Image (tube, rainbow, N blue to C red):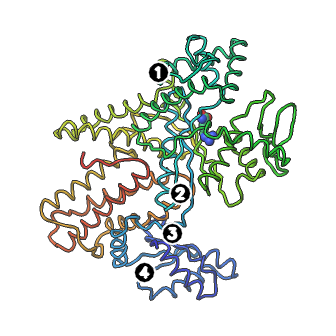
């Protein structure tokens, strides 16, 4: 139970004793800490419902609470707000409970099977800076679900099956017609070694796309190649497998560098065999019907506020679409993985697509009411000038270059601030890596996923202000305080009642984590955690300045403070871990 739920229960019981709804007793953190630590505003709504004077009701509630052992001080403000402080003994008990709990008060939810679909990288294409959003947001949301106790699977869900595959095959055939992949009469196996590198593919991809636009013959051959690939032509399949393998290897190295880990490396192709029977079933069941030579599903509803066009299941050329593949994937996830919730971290610009797919999945029975389908969309990344991100040369920066640059800048920042200078070189590099990644990740995750933001490594890598490196610096400060204490033979002990406001504020902040976590998970909003990490770091700094732990003569007080430091460090590290950020031991 969290501090706020306990307080709400106590104040709720007071309302109940007065014949009113217990829910009115909801206690929240005070908006104005100078008036009290917590507040309850329920008397205003309660008075309205009961036709009473709000201030009278509030003072009746205060009277009811007079003997509560957890509450140290109560008063009335304005038209009927109740302000309250808890006792220092209560705060000491809270700290003891938090110190003994690896989840810091977060309740285990009843476990669901959740699939988080994030990544969405495409075969033959490099990751660019824009891909950082989905990767980092998805990773964080996956970790949150895990902490809540759910059984979570992260799927990269590669784009590996659409029209670009036929375009690449056609481009290859034009360049290397003698390869066995193109000989329909080829007997036996195909070479094990890939005929192309990832660099070749990345160069061919835009070239082929350009030809599709300029050259109708190339476009027609590409379409035919896609159809033949999907129909299982062995040479094309063998070549395509090489495309996938070299792409996955390259993608993996970037995701690894970011610390983003997928449990599944499935893609659109994985569900290919499900598509034909699924389409057949939808036709037979009357869910899909023919319109202008295509097979479509009407998904509009009478009360739609925007126009939702029919979902295209099979287009007029007989090809399956992106939507068909996502539908078959829902079927696969529900049937084979027993998914109860599927969360898509995908660009907001695809929201219509997901709306159509989700509605169709409900209509066609792929997902019953017991399966949650959720598109938690993200906005885009802009450059520091607020305009679409471009390098000096005009392209979009490659993600691997961005990561390297963040780490290099972190190293420079550390040098400029005289941090980590006398540590061994390998440790310095590891610190720079952690700090650089923290800069990148915090810079991303501090923004609500749905809003666009300006990508600015200069700002992100600063050691002061609302940045990842600043928060890491605070954790390093706590670590080194604990290390110095241990060196002096001082160890954390039982929490004693706090003796000053900085200490009280830090404990109250620590105890707030369950509500913060709840809000972050429900809203699929890592920025709520990012904000909290910053607040917690600030509270710790104020405590650190106010309480001189190592020179404190009272042993009980000192060991209690060390417990507070140790607990803050562990909780902050957990919050950062939910954001994918690693803390250095020292800086
Ligand atoms: N590969 C897609 C793209 O580049 C994103 C895939 C997202 N996931 C999904 N299940 N549709 O737009």
Residue annotated with mark 2: 521
Nearest to viewer (mark 1 / mark 4): 1
Instruction: Quadrant for residue 553, please give it.
Output: bottom left
Mark 1 vs mark 4, CA separation in Å:
68 Å
The outermost residue toward the front is: 187
Q: Secondary structure at mark 2?
A: helix
The tag earlier along the polypeptide, 3 or 1, is 3
Asked whether mark 1 and ligand 1 are closer than 8 Å, the reply comes as no
Separation of disc 3 and disc 1 at Cα?
58 Å
Q: Nearer the viewer, mark 2 or mark 4?
A: 2
Q: Is residue 395 visible?
A: yes
Q: Earlier in the sequence, mark 2 or mark 4?
A: 4
Label 3 sits on residue: 28
Task: Find residue 141 and report its horizontal and vertical position in percent.
Answer: 51, 51
Q: Earlier in the sequence, mark 2 or mark 3?
A: 3
Q: Is mark 2 within 8 Å of ligand 1?
A: no
Question: Percent x, y for residue 415?
Answer: 24, 35
The disc placed on residue 197 is 1
Q: Residue at x 52, y 74 (%)?
A: 77
Left or right: residue 313 versus residue 452 is right
């Amino acid at each position: 139970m969290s501090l706020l739920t306990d307080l709400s229960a106590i104040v709720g019981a007071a309302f109940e004793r007065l014949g009113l709804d217990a829910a009115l007793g909801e206690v929240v953190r005070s908006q104005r800490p100078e008036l009290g630590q917590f507040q309850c505003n329920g008397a205003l709504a309660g008075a309205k419902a009961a036709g009473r004077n709000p201030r009278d009701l509030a003072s009746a509630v205060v009277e009811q609470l007079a003997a509560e052992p957890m509450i140290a001080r109560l008063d009335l403000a304005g038209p009927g707000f109740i302000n309250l402080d808890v006792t220092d003994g209560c705060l000491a008990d809270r700290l003891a409970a938090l110190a003994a709990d690896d989840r810091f008060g977060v309740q285990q939810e009843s476990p669901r099977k959740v699939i988080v679909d994030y990544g969405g990288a495409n075969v033959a294409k490099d990751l660019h800076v824009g891909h950082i959003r989905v990767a980092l947001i998805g990773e964080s949301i996956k970790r949150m679900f895990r902490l809540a106790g759910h059984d979570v699977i992260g799927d990269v869900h590669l784009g590996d099956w659409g029209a670009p595959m036929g375009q690449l095959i056609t481009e290859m055939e034009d360049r290397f017609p003698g390869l066995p992949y193109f000989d329909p009469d080829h007997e036996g196996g195909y070479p094990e070694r890939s005929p192309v590198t990832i660099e070749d593919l990345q160069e061919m991809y835009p070239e082929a796309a350009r030809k599709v636009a300029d050259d109708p013959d190339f476009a027609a051959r590409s379409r035919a190649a896609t159809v033949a690939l999907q129909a299982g032509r062995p040479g094309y399949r063998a070549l395509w497998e090489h495309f996938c393998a070299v792409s996955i290897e390259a993608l993996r190295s970037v995701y690894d560098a970011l610390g983003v880990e997928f449990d599944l490396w499935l893609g659109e192709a994985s569900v290919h065999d499900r598509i034909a029977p699924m389409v057949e079933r939808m036709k037979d069941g009357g869910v899909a019907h023919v319109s202008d030579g295509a097979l479509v599903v009407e998904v509009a509803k009478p009360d739609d506020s925007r126009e939702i066009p029919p979902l295209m299941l099979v287009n007029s050329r007989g090809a399956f679409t992106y939507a068909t593949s996502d539908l078959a994937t829902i079927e696969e996830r529900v049937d084979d993985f027993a998914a109860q919730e599927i969360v898509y971290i995908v660009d907001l610009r695809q929201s219509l697509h997901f709306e159509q797919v989700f509605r169709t999945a409900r209509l066609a029975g792929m997902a019953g009411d017991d399966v949650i389908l959720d598109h938690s969309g993200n906005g885009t990344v802009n450059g520091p000038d607020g305009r679409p991100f471009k390098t000096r040369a005009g392209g979009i920066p490659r993600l691997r270059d961005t990561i390297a640059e963040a780490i290099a800048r972190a190293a420079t920042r550390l040098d400029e601030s005289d941090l980590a200078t006398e540590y061994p070189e390998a440790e310095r590099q590891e610190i720079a890596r952690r700090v650089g990644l923290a800069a990148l990740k915090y810079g991303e995750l501090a923004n609500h996923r749905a809003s666009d933001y300006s990508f600015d490594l200069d700002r992100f890598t600063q050691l002061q202000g609302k940045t990842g490196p600043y928060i890491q610096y605070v954790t390093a400060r706590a670590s080194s305080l604990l290390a110095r204490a241990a060196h002096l033979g001082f160890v954390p002990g039982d929490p004693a009642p706090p003796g000053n406001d900085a200490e009280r504020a830090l404990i109250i902040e620590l105890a707030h984590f369950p509500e913060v976590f709840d809000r972050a998970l429900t809203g699929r909003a890592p920025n709520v955690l990012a904000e909290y990490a910053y607040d917690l770091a600030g509270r710790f700094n104020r405590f650190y300045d106010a309480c001189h732990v190592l020179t404190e003569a009272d042993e009980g007080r000192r060991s209690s403070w060390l417990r507070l430091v140790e607990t803050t460090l562990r909780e902050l590290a957990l919050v950062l871990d939910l954001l994918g950020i690693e803390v250095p031991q020292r800086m």
